[in-house]
Image (spheres, coloured by chain):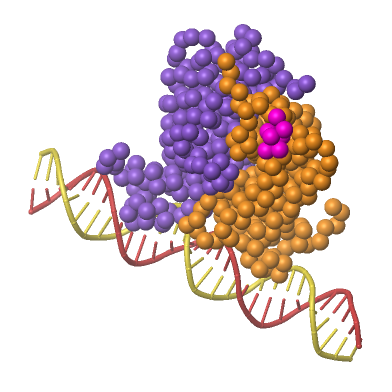
Chain colours: A orange, B purple, C red, D yellow
Amino acid sequence: MADPNTRDKILDVGEVLFARRGFAGVGMREVADRVGLGKSSLFHHFRSKVQLYLAVLERVLARIQERVAPALKDTGDPCERLDRYLDAFIDALAEHPTTARLLLRGIFEDDDFDAGTFPEHHVEHRLEVILSDARRLIEAGVEAGAFRDVSPPHMMQTLIGATVYHFASGEFGEGLLGRPLLSAEAVARRKDELKALLHNGLWVKAQ
Amino acid sequence: MADPNTRDKILDVGEVLFARRGFAGVGMREVADRVGLGKSSLFHHFRSKVQLYLAVLERVLARIQERVAPALKDTGDPCERLDRYLDAFIDALAEHPTTARLLLRGIFEDDDFDAGTFPEHHVEHRLEVILSDARRLIEAGVEAGAFRDVSPPHMMQTLIGATVYHFASGEFGEGLLGRPLLSAEAVARRKDELKALLHNGLWVKAQ
DNA sequence: CTTGCTCCCGACCGATCGGTCGGGTACCGT
DNA sequence: ACGGTACCCGACCGATCGGTCGGGAGCAAG
């Protein structure tokens, strides 16, 4: 992290700003100022604003995939591997507070088919690939009878939602919880919740 | 809905566009075109773009509150009232597909303290008021022993996350589920899930 | 007919947007 | 000493931004 090159510094600044204000809300001038460069110098490292934005998203997605990959190479029953996968996924979101919001914003922009500014469904496709592994683990667990009455797609939707929202909820979530979202305590709790959600058979209707 | 006045038409268009592209991503020109007006005519109904945006958010928040209010006036034990409250909250999000994204974007913008373009923590304060009722119901349920081992703040965070994300996940979520997010089936399932989440004692660690 | 109000419009404003251009400087291998 | 390349800069470009202004059409009250 010490003495990062200029390109990485631009990506760092872009990541923070895009997560805060979204693609349209950030000007190249502001990015350049924060990096300590002239605006025109940015275009030496990235051909356009869109390219910079895509590079930021790409780095974020790669970081998640990198975190999650080891959990899949493990041997062992699908149930334990899924636990490790979920831990890794949460760690990936907790690592940088910007990640969750960038993912959500990426999903939003992917759906904005009117404006052809971004490659079609870029983030969504990448996310599908990353999360398809988790889905396969859940399906394997269901077949093995480890989870009661679980529908993998709905389970995925809930797991993603509860997790991504938590780290994207910002000051609103912190006010609710009364502690920082990234505190070791809150992160550990989130991990426990996801596992309990799986193992307790969420979708067994309360009698 | 028949023959709405011009002001409401502007709000309708603004709601759709702001949900799609966010505040910074929408131009007054585009809004005016979709309504069928000249750009300058918009400023006859709203003093500025910010005022239009706040009016859109305000209408969305009011709609949620309106939906949720009857569930609170009910008598009966807190457990049943909470069930009705959650149903109403989900109905409010399902009513307009734009709602969830506008809420998330509002939370994001509230945290962007750098840009003083919006009143401080406007959406977050309004949401806190709306959701504080649910929190009180959960606390009452915990005291009555209806829910095992539940921490109200964490429960709230998970309930909000799973619900809001579901309706904000757009084409990504639909691809995962294989059906429209707003289909009666998916909405009903979401209601069942939230209730099961409460009654099954999510936070009892799996043994 | 006049006055005034509501609603809408095209023309226009200064500011800012993403992006280009020519030139400057420092370090490179030769 | 040389040309080349990587990096950075200020000046500038056309387009678009939010917003203003003067005025026109329609309608109601006097």
- Residue at image point 34% right, 48% down: B44
- Image location of residue C14, percent across then percent down: 49, 62
Quadrant that contains the N terminus of chain B = top left
**Figure quadrant of the C terminus of chain B:** top right
Q: Is residue B18 visible?
A: yes
Q: Position of residue B202 (x, y in %)?
A: 67, 22
Q: Is residue A180 visible?
A: no
Left of B94 or right of it: where is A131? Answer: right
Tell me which corner region of the image, top left, top right, bottom left or bottom right, holds residue B2: top left
Tell me which residue sits at (70%, 16%) in the image.
B149
Is A76 located above or below residue A178 in the figure? below
Residue A17 coordinates in the image, percent (x, y) = 66, 51
Q: Which residues are magenta?
A: A139-145
Residue B14 is left or right of residue B135, and the answer is left
State which quadrant residue D5 falls in: bottom right
Please, what is the dominant secondary structure of the magenta stretch? helix
